[in-house]
Amino acid sequence: MKKLFVILVALAAGGAVNAQTFYAQGGLNLANISKNDAGETNDRNTLATFNAGAMVRFGLSKVFDLETGLLFTGRGAKSDTYFGSNEDDNYIKAKFNPYYIELPLNAVVKFPLAADGKTNIFVNAGPYVAVGVAGKSKVESKFLGVTTSSSESIKFNDDDPTTSGQENARYDRLKRFDYGLNFGAGIDLGTVMLKANYGLGLAKISSLETNNSDDDKNKYRTLSISVGIPLGR
């Protein structure tokens, strides 16, 4: 996975030289982690975080294009547990917020709204790979009016992707590499691009779990609402 990520970054950088549209992107992530075999999540656990980076499109035609880039993007989830009806006391609140450098590769189908093709509605889909780089886990509790809190840096394992195991696998480590599929849609108004994207993680995030196909528990689910500002066309 590490070698593949490096190769894809190099291809994206080389392709960017010939790109027709280069744009900065930023927006809101509503992140979660799947809880059952069907890949579903608990809505109460949704964590608000963000994405930011640079993307390129190659201008292949007015109706079809390819898109790639690099994004600094937040994942994770939260958990709020209340011991009683009073939500201002007697609770435990935890937030788990890792950050990744993500490289997507999307096929884009455009439905032009103007003859020049610069204004259009579009849908996109494609794979992504991501590498974990940072993050924090935070816990706050309050009992009988006394509040305590703690914060720790999220740790990733030092996996060698050329082997079948997970090197440095521990209960307090995440897998360094994540991968999955993106599905999205939006509107390109020429001067601004409005996008919605759903990231369907396919890798279990715990470094102790190696069978990603056994069930859909413990995988990232991320809804993103973003704005793109073209820097050149």
Image: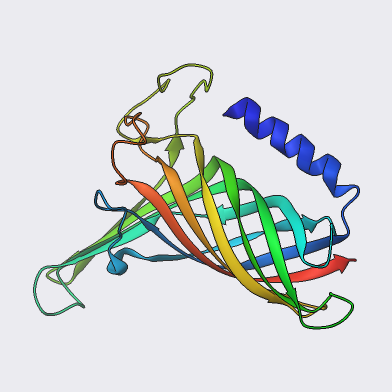
Vertical placement of residue 211 versus 48, above or below: above
Visible residue check, residue 195: no
Query: Is 219 located above or below residue 162 in the figure?
Result: below
Asked whether residue 5 appears in the rendered view, the answer is yes
Residue 23 picture quarter = bottom right
Left-right relation of 83 to 222: left
Specify whether 147 is left or right of 102.
left
Nearer-the-camera pick, 137 or 165: 165
Which image quadrant: the N terminus? top right
Nearest the eye: 225 or 90: 225
Residue lying at 37% horizontally and 47% vertically, measured from the top left = 219
Q: Is residue 12 above or below residue 171?
A: below
Q: Position of residue 4 (x, y in %)?
A: 64, 30
* Place of residue 193 in the rendered image (x, y in percent of width and height, measured from the top left): 72, 74
Please, which residue is most extreme toward the left here?
84
Question: Could you tell me which residue is drawn at 69 percent across and 60 percent down?
Answer: 108
Q: In the displayed image of the protein, which residue is found farthest to the bottom? A: 114
57 up-or-down from 28: above or below: above
Q: Quadrant of the C terminus?
A: bottom right
The front one of 111 and 210 is: 111
Residue 114: horizontal and vertical position, in percent? 83, 83
Q: Residue at x 45, y 29 (%)?
A: 157
